[in-house]
Image: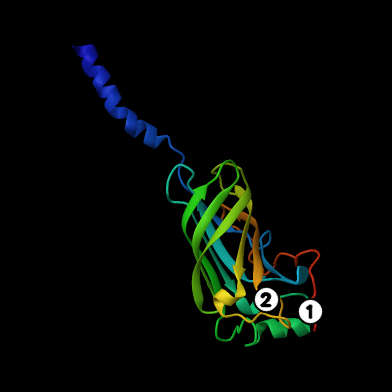
Amino acid sequence: MRNACWMLLCLSLLPALSKSHAPAAESYRLDMVKTRVSFNIEHFGVPWVSAWFPDFSGDFVLDRDGTASRLDVSVQTATVDCTEPLWNGRLRSADWLDVQRYPLTSFHSTRVDFEGDGAALASGELTLHGITRTVGLAISGLRCSGGTASGASCSFIARTRIKRSDYGLPHGFWTGGDLVDIVISGAGVRSSDLASDGVRAAPPTGSVTPRAY
């Protein structure tokens, strides 16, 4: 009888013990030095313009065994940079991003589904040019090191493709194609001691200067 009681007690404790040993959700903040937020537009299948946003903030949570995973990124739209001063002004004008009226672009995930080792799909809301639509960010190359200690990091690449027309942005023969590829490539760090001296990631290599038609 005593053995049976002990067995019942042990069985009742198993769920609690299993839960206590489950990996906790891990929070990371995007490293502004190692992360790049950029976009690319083609025109008749030819690379037409590539630009990046040096001023942004963001964080993400990894919870592989639960539902707490998320990704949030906010971009200061007025910092858009394609390495060409004349075109920088054009991209920031009311004819394009209209940064005076819409200074912020943001993505907030509503769900993250892991798809095997190092891959996930972050579904959420992208707000651009004053319009919010649901998009999916395909995450690949997710690699983490350092465990849960301060200074641990995770690197990743997140991609999505949107239509400029969905966000009220001009497109056409003189302004490039409708499709835009958005890429977030970088790393998150579990330490609050991140670089904050204004240093930003370098512009994307192989940037394409917009063509004047």
The residue shown at (61%, 75%) is 164
Residue 17, can we see it?
Answer: yes
Indicate how the structure is coloured in the image.
rainbow
Q: CA distance from mark 2 to mark 1?
A: 11 Å
The residue shown at (73%, 81%) is 173
| Residue 27 x %, y % | 50, 52
Badge number at residue 84: 1
Q: In the picture shown, does residue 99 fall above or below 154?
A: below
Q: Secondary structure at mark 1?
A: loop
Q: Secondary structure at mark 2?
A: loop
Q: Quadrant of the N terminus?
A: top left
Q: Is residue 8 left or right of residue 133?
A: left
Badge number at residue 37: none
Q: Amino acid at mark 2?
A: Val
Residue 192, can we see it?
Answer: no
Q: Nearer the viewer, residue 151 or 64?
A: 64
User: Badge 1 local density, few (<14 within 10 Å), some, or many (20+)?
Assistant: few
The residue shown at (75%, 82%) is 87
Q: Quadrant of the C terminus?
A: bottom right
The residue shown at (65%, 87%) is 95
Q: Nearer the viewer, residue 164 or 86?
A: 164
Q: Amino acid at mark 1?
A: Glu
Q: In the picture shown, does residue 10 fall above or below 76?
A: above
Quarter of the rendering containing residue 106: bottom right
| Residue 158 x %, y % | 62, 57
Badge number at residue 80: 2
| Residue 193 x %, y % | 59, 57
Q: In the picture shown, does residue 184 fall above or below 149?
A: below
Q: In the picture shown, does residue 80 fall above or below 64?
A: below
Q: Nearer the viewer, residue 72 or 13?
A: 72
| Residue 202 x %, y % | 75, 65
